Image: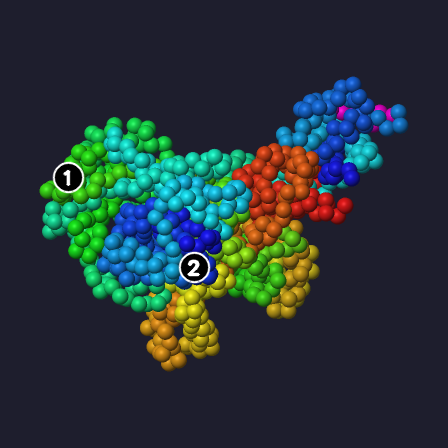
Amino acid sequence: MNTISPEIICAVATPEGTSALSVIRVSGKGSFDLLEKIMSLEKNRLTGMRRKVGRIIEEDRTVDEVVAVSWPEGRSFTGEEMVEIICHGIPRSIREIIEILIKNGARRAEQGEFARRAFGNGRMNAVQIIALAALWDMESGQKVFNGETEDSCRKLLSGIESTRETVEGIIEFGETHLEGNEESIRSVFGELIQRAKDFNKEAASIEKSSRVMIMGPVNSGKSTLFNMLTGKGRALVSSEPGTTRDGSTCFMELSGRRVQICDTAGTDGLGLDRSASEAVIDGLDGTERVIWMSTGGKTPPADEVRERAGEIIEIAAKSDLVDKNGTEEILSVSSVSGEGIEELKIVLSRVPGSMSLSGTARRILDSIKESYRFVSAHEYDLAAEILGDTEIEARRIIGSGENIQLSVERALSGMCVGK
Amino acid sequence: MIKEWDVIVVGGGHAGIEAALAATRIGCRVVLISAKISRIGEMSCNPAIGGIAKGTIVREIDALDGSMARSADATTLHFRMLNRRKGPAVWGPRVQSDAAEYARIQQLYIGNKGIDVIEDEVTGLDGVTEMVTGVRCRKIGTIRGKTVVLAAGTFLRGRLFRGDELWKGGRIGDISADSLERDLAERMFHVERFKTGTPARIVRSTVNTAELEVQQSEGTDFTFSFDERRPSTKEEVCYITYTDKNTMNIAKDFLHLSPLMAGRIEGTGPRYCPSYEDKVVKFPDRERHKIFVEPMGYCSRDFYLNGLSTSLPREAQISMVRSLPGFRRAEISDYGYAVEYSYFDFSEIDDTLRLRRTENVFAAGQICGTSGYEEAAGLGLIAGANAGRFAKNLELLKLSRMNSYIGVMIDDIVSKGADEPYRMFSSRAENRLHLRQDNADRRLYKSGDRFGILSQEKRELLHSSLKEADTIGNILDSETVDGTRISKWCRRPGISVEDVVARSHSLIDRDKRVLASVLLDEKYRGYIERNLRRHESSRNLENISLRRIGSYMEIDEICWEAREVLERDRPDTMARAEKIPGIRPTDLHGLLIYLGRQGST
């Protein structure tokens, strides 16, 4: 039996269209041999980390003059043997190179397959992938992932560990040798809760791009729409524990993407409570989508919203009550008849999907608070039990537990081919 | 004299006694060999039984029909439920016992059950290591037996230290089993050294107890044994005193004479029961350490100084003791000392407590690397039961770590080993909310029955508890309070047994101890079920063998680093592979895929 090796995958890693240069990525065991073959490199073999200039030749015809950069197994992005072909950015020759690669044993990569292999080979952890996905989602691109989220998760984890040690210490030695620790537990938990909050912020900041705010004037049907989209009993609502809706926020899965829907009903968009609605608008940082609702599409989005929102989806609500005005950009939706809801979901599913990282972060914070409540109620046994679970949860974010694997799949599905 | 016994037990401490009794309950002819039979069952260190997790072990021993709980109950002078304000899953019953009475009662059990007792020194195993034929003794020669349980405690090449004094011995006034240790070494058993110690005993009449804090007993209602018999009506109080700067300075002045610091003791001591000089070195800023003053027996001559274990020279010990409030004129009756001894490396012992390289030699107690009476007794019971089962040609059995502290302890010591004497902690049990002192009878009934170590009386008693719990469970499930089933309603915070009884007339005549225990089952049910599921999923990995794998370096499904680590460690099973640092779930998935492919070609 031949030794089984994962297939060689290839894809263009740069945007479509004509450009000066383009990069084609090739990954998998045997990539070096493949490149040597199509570049006729017998003498100047690709080994280890090398850079070779050469021609890709097909039936004695030079397709392109390229630079091949090779990374050995264990040191590349994917962790596998990998080659990046820097070629000219001419769509025709790029296509041809890909075809040649495929003819010689490679296959086209699927969405996010390079990153998936990097994850599978332990080159990237879940936080990094999620952050990468979020980074790619961001059109502005000003936010650079620098491992901060991972650091704050590690800090949180070590905080959970030491708090648990303190609690266990009180259980095992509290009666004999560790008096006084029961007083200090308050400050220990205080510090831990702060770390969990920090991590929440970090997690939320890399997930922000997936948020959709429902806004609009009073009585335009925002809450009805929110309930309609996220309503109980619908398969749309995530059944994952901890990602519970707190009344105004809900995670939905749309076409495999994860989208956070926020209802601003509580603050009434631009309604009566001016200070509250200002807070909502201040919260928009140019990356978020806003569903702007008004009855029959008659109230245009407020200027502040236009300035600060990333993208606005205008909706004519209560379409069962008003005449259709025929404007194509405005989607007509009736929360009563259900008209337009499916169309809206399709629109929403184009929103870059994101991860459950912030859901996990929130769950960790809640668990820590619950553990502290048990400590206050003198139920150290349960406090320790919950901290133990929380520790596993935090570990899973940094490592690659099975739950995270699912989340990573979601993040990867939002990436384009070649990443 | 009998030509061949079923089980030979070497050692008459807490482990040896339970081993001998358990094998007897299985129906074996048992001989117990002790170097000094008058000291069988002695409490070599503090006169107390139980504590957090340890107290639960004692109740487990009782559920398996051992003698420790009953002997402790019969000699209880003082009782406290530790952790009463930390949650019922971590309550730890602890009693002060009359040490001399305790040993006397344990000896009575041995005698009553028809166990033969021989006073001699065992100098070695007899026959080939793979299948021994008995043991060799110094005076009476060879004793033949189908199985041997080694429970030699601290006697294997025991060395006693105090300042620059050094003796051979497993305990003060006893011999050291040097010949037995040599025989084991010659048979190529891997042994290591540990150390432990004991504090000075103080003449009670020389202590001014008026200067001490009194620690009252919580009364004598509690019994370790589920028999709930309470023959002891005697009570004592305990006292608390504290060390101060003077105590610390004296210890510091003599530190250079400590056998430990001078490097004469190489064995590792128990981190959680350290000597006073250890504390001084490790916590130089802490002058004040709590010292519990415990009577050795009812109206006994001596006090035990719990927390002041030391092997410093005599003059240091007397000065340290006299620096304590209430002890200005104290006299020491027995000085503290340290003992260094040999124990089996964990790789020698399997999960039935049999020595791996033998068919019929078992080990229990401190020679397995543990510390504590309760731990020793728990191991002794299982080693004795399995030795008995082997002698009777029955399958050897083990306890699950999800169902008992004894199971946790055995699993820990045979799979991980210990770099210090192993003491049981509640936090070692992942299913701690289930391993409570209140339900040990119900948890272990099935195991005890399978082992065949329950007397008729015990079986009936435990079975009736189980039936009672069933009845109560049915009532809780069928009756409601305000439309909610009681089994669910009782989980609300602050609901007491009395509250539940007040809401259901059917519960009025039920056993309140069992009812309280069943209510705790309900309280923790969700957590326990989740723990069991988690354990189950890791057990699936346990069933996947990796032994067929030739070279990990050729497995392309897993990353390079993982290949190297796996090649180095070569784990037996998927579960072991999972525990290796650096192995990620994706590597395990890769391994599964690889194994799947291998299987299909």
The amino acid on which the numbered mark 2 sits, given as a three-letter code, is Thr
Residue visible at 53% across and 50% down? A305
Residue B24 is labelled as 2
Numbered badge on residue B323: 1
Magenta range is: A61-67
Residue B454 in magenta?
Answer: no
What quarter of the picture does the N terminus of chain B occupy? bottom left
Which dot, 1 or 2, sits closer to the camera? 2
Q: Earlier in the sequence, mark 1 or mark 2?
A: 2
* Label 2 secondary element: helix
Depth check, front residue: A46 or A99: A46
Q: Residue lying furthest front in this view?
A: B1
Q: Report if the CB atoms under discs 1 and 2 are less than 8 Å apart.
A: no
Front-most of B519 and B253? Answer: B253
Indicate whether B439 appears above or below A149.
below
User: Looking at this rendering, what residue extends furthest in the bottom direction?
Assistant: B505
The part of the image, by quadrant, that contains residue A25 is: top right
Of residues B536 and B76, which is closer to you in this image?
Answer: B76
Give the letter of the chain under mark 2.
Answer: B
Report the magenta stretch's main SS: strand
Left or right relative to A175: residue B414: right
Residue depicted at x 48% and y 43%: B126
Q: Residues within 10 Å of mark 1 (few under 14, many from 20)?
A: many
Q: Residue at x 28, y 32 (%)?
A: B166
Q: For the C terminus of chain B, give its image quadrant.
A: top right
What's the CA distance linking mark 1 and mark 2?
50 Å
**In which quarter of the view is residue B511 placed?**
bottom left
